[in-house]
Amino acid sequence: MAAAVSAITERIPPPARGEVHVWLAWTERFAAAETLDYCRTLLAPDELEKWRRFHFERDRQLYLVAHAMVRQVLAAYLAIAPERLQFAANRYGRPELVREPGMPDLRFNLSHAHGLAALVVTRSADCGIDVEARRELGDLAAMAGQVLTAAERDYLWRLPDAERNWAFLKLWTLKEAYIKAVGKGLSLALHEFGFALGADISIRFQTGSADAPGEWQFAQRFPGSDHVLALALRSGDGLTCVYREWAPQRQGGSA
């Protein structure tokens, strides 16, 4: 997928067909009390209730920024107030936008890891995103045995010890992005499909899968030295990815 960078504007056209918009928000840049107060005004009552239940302030801030970004970005695409947006979860818990008459068919997916929230938006195409922060994973052999295919495990163990944690996270983000795009959550067994990393990332299904590799495109990006991001999109055509950094904006001015 080709990548392009675009400036942020207050009102923006939704993604064209064949285009993917990815929004990033670094929570360290949202420290001002006024900005956080404004983010709270964007959340619905049920979202605010979830926000209050987080024990650690860094988790509260990450949830607040991530969900404020979803509401303001989608509202900007649709030219409506953020509070008008309604969401419904599918049978596996994935939130989806409730469309009003005349609304474009926007699909979105949200992910966040320590310090970073990431949102992907497409028109009509199933999409999934996952972002992970660099960290030590503990018993890597046990984790790999549970979620990686034999080919992925072979790839992992051929790497030097110091590179295995990061390589596992790269594979993990791709798996998470795919299952989020499919919309079935962890009802899909992670060891039943795998990836070959490289310039062109491809998915490989174990025998018996109803899905077809040619229906999917994947991309991986490193927003910072300690984060890895993966995208999964159900499309056999070429796609252009536009990456933007989000900052909350009040109507008529910035927060």
Image (cartoon, rainbow, N blue to C red):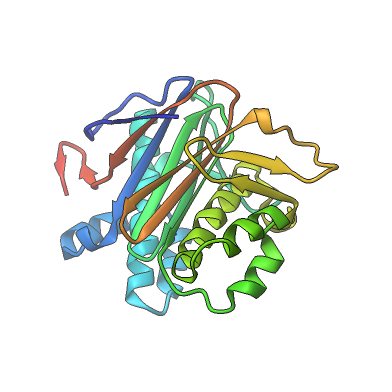
Query: In the figure, residue 216 lies in which quadrant?
Result: top right
Identity of the residue drawn at 55% across and 54% down = 171
Q: Quadrant of the N terminus?
A: top left
Residue at screen point 33% across, 75% down: 57
Q: Residue at the right extreme?
A: 208
Considering only vertical position in the picture, is 100 above or below 162? above
**Quarter of the rendering containing residue 139:** bottom right
Q: How many numbered badges does the structure rendering display?
A: 0
Locate residue 113, reporting x and y percent: 41, 62
Judging depth in this view, the residue of 202 and 97 nearest the camera is 202
Q: Position of residue 150 (x, y in %)?
A: 72, 57
Q: Position of residue 42 (x, y in %)?
A: 34, 51
246, above or below 78, in the image: below
Q: Is residue 43 visible?
A: no
Q: Looking at the picture, tell me which residue is in the foreground, 248 or 241.
A: 241
Q: Position of residue 184 (x, y in %)?
A: 69, 49
- Regarding residue 178, the answer to whether it shows in the image is yes
Q: Residue at x 37, y 30 (%)?
A: 77
Say which residue appears at 60% left-offset and 56% top-offset.
155
Which one is nearer the viewer's eye here, 85 or 112? Answer: 112
Q: Nearer the viewer, residue 212 or 117?
A: 212
